[in-house]
Amino acid sequence: MSSASIKAVRGTRDLLPPETELWNRVEATARAVFARYHFGEIRTPLFEDTSLFARGVGEETDIVSKEMYTWEDRARAASEKPQSLTLRPENTAGVVRSYIEHKLGDTGNLQKLFYIGPQFRRERPQRGRYRQFWQIGAEVIGPPSSGSESPIRDAEVLEMLATLLDELGITGWNLQLNSVGSATDRPRYVAALREALAPIKDRLCPDNQRRAETNPLRVLDSKDEADQDLINALPKIADFLDEASTSHFQQVLAALDACGVPYTVNPRLVRGLDYYTRTTFEFTHSVGLGSQNALLGGGRYDGLSEMLGGPRAPGIGFAIGEDRLILTLQAQAEAAGTSSATDKIDAYIAPMGAAQNASALALARSLRREGLSIETGDGTFRLKKSFDTADKIARHIVILGEDEAATNTYTVKTFATGIQSKIERSALTAALLA
Ligand code: AMP
């Protein structure tokens, strides 16, 4: 057997402290903002029946055709067929499955649900693109009578995202949006695209030639430099929208104007997934992400519930790439010369000799129960080592020797001021919080 050490699988990574503190701060801010907009949390399973994604996301999408982690589960009995299971590549399909399964539409109310969790796609790993990555997302879905189809829902979701990015401290984000029309507009547009692509197809890169055949909308997503002029000259979806979709889009834009949320209409933003109708959007950012500059994406999916065998339930949602959000915040902090370093703990207790180890733990216990953050050293450490360690991680060091234990009075040094003094236990908590 090889004795080589085992590493994290390609495209996956460990998130370690102190970086995880930033992750927690981002998630806490997201939860606080979602609560203010009346969203509740949903947690769906990490794996689902493969057919959910084949039907919900679309067989012809890159995600389903190339990127899913799928396996056959062992059958429980010889008579049973093995079930095909898939690690979720995104969370909207799972949320809508759950909405249908639990008959959430029967309440008649609009459902506003958010999730935070890992997703899995077998993409080529690079900066900002991983095979296990995290998404923070939300869905607004309900029967038409709940107002789920209203353009105000789209605008509210977009305005909430602008608020969330502002509160996280992301500066210089750019909201791009478009309308991909209704379930009947889209096929008309796709047919026109196919027609326009046919005579120029041979001049496109091999990837776009394949897309032109399988999923022509994806050609519009292409970043291939050489193909840009040809792509810009293709028909625009705006010219294929029916009156209702056009009016819906105009109302979304007007509501954003009323709220003062800036945006850019991008006629090429059609997004890869089959389920989108009407409003589609992305928030991009130019700092720290390189070519993977989409911080988040989303859109309306008025027909998705029916595609999954459910009742009519229009909806709109988004997924933020949390990994990319973190990279952006780190790049911003670096550019501004501020560190994203974490706060120091309140105190480090240094027992003088192994005999004081238990007293140190007891003192730590009582201080921690009062809410202080404490680390303890070990009686075998030399005093210099204790001071060096404490200086790196704590604001104060508390020396606990035989005398201190006997008199309940401790030697405390505050690193910021360099002042050292003797402090009684009754005054210790306040001193360490100072
Ligand atoms: P999508 O579900 O493809 O619309 O993606 C929504 C957001 O998730 C994107 O804008 C990215 O920020 C993020 N994302 C998608 N795929 C990955 C990946 N492989 N690694 C990291 N983030 C991703």
Image (cartoon, rainbow, N blue to C red):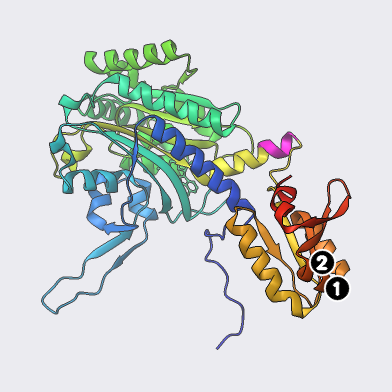
Residue bearing the label numbered 2: 386
**Compared to 433, does 220 lie above or below?**
above
Magenta residues span: 332-336
Residue occupying the point 44% across, 45% down: 135
**Compared to 161, does 342 lie above or below?**
below
User: Could you tell me which secondary element the residue under label 1 belongs to?
Assistant: loop
Q: Report whether residue 221 is seen.
A: no
Q: Are marks 2 and 1 in contact (CB under 8 Å)?
A: yes
Provide the major secondary structure of the magenta segment.
Answer: helix
User: Could you tell me which secondary element the residue under label 2 belongs to?
Assistant: helix
- Residue 317 located within the stretch drawn in magenta: no
The three-letter amino acid code for the residue at tag 2 is Ser
Residue bearing the label numbered 1: 382
Report x, y in % for residue 99: 21, 43
Report x, y in % for residue 426: 71, 55
Q: In which quarter of the image is residue 337?
A: top right
Residue occupying the point 55% across, 43% down: 25
**Compared to 262, does 51 lie above or below?**
below
